[in-house]
Amino acid sequence: MPRIEPLSDPTAADRVAILAPLEAFSQAIGFVWKPESLVLVLRDDAGGIVGGLISETNWGWLHISILAVAEHLRGQSWGSGLMNEAERIAQGRGCHHAWVDTFSFQARPFYERLGYRVFGELPDYPRGETRYFLSKSLETPGDRPSPQATSTRQQA
């Protein structure tokens, strides 16, 4: 009989096993889950890491998990540079959109300056603050198929 138990420090193999039923289901209906890591580092003159971006691409979307820049480098466009480079690479992988989440005490205005728009929020996460979810199209108007082309493809 199956049982539920906590796992405080899951291994890579544990994660693969947990994800396996979802991957099998998704693949069976035509959605293969194959996220591709996209990580950028910001190095100082001595070669040390002073920030970076951790993300992945899948199904035409870039998901930014972490963006961090050392305090002494903030306000010097390093964060924008990391975002721009991630978006450029993601577009090269065929991504048409990007999404990120942040908090009311962090970087919402920064992402909005880069063209991201709020599509959801969780109030009181953490208590007294809000977690925001933002997205952005990576396509230019010429990149999008016309409605006629889309309906023609669907009829074919």
Image (spheres, rainbow, N blue to C red):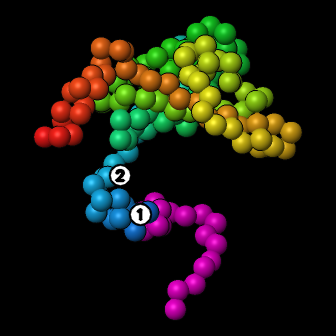
Residue at the spot x=40%, y=68% of the render? 21
Element under label 1? helix
Label annotation for residue 109: none
Residue at the spot x=56%, y=22% of the render? 116
48 or 86: which is nearer to us?
86
Distance from Cα at disc 2 to Cα at disc 1: 9 Å
Determine whether 11 is above or below 133 in the image: below
Q: Inspect the magenta stretch and tell me whether residue 65 lies in it.
A: no
Along the horizontal axis of the image, is 37 left or right of 11?
A: left
Which segment did they paint magenta? 1-18
- Of the two numbered discs 2 and 1 on the same chain, state the one appearing first in sequence: 1
Determine whether 9 is above or below 142 in the image: below
42 or 64: which is nearer to us?
64
Q: Position of residue 99 (x, y in %)?
A: 52, 32
Q: Inspect the magenta stretch and tell me whether residue 17 lies in it.
A: yes
Residue 146 in view: yes
Q: Position of residue 128 (x, y in %)?
A: 86, 39
Q: Position of residue 34 (x, y in %)?
A: 33, 48
The chief SS type of the magenta part is loop
Label annotation for residue 22: 1
Determine whether 129 is above or below 83 in the image: below
Estimate how packed mark 1 is, as few (under 14), some (14 to 19) or many (20 or more) residues with alpha carbons within 10 Å: few
Amino acid tagged 1: Leu
Along the horizontal axis of the image, is 40 left or right of 51?
A: left
Identify the residue at the far bottom of this view.
1
Amino acid tagged 2: Trp
Q: Which residue is mark 2?
A: 33
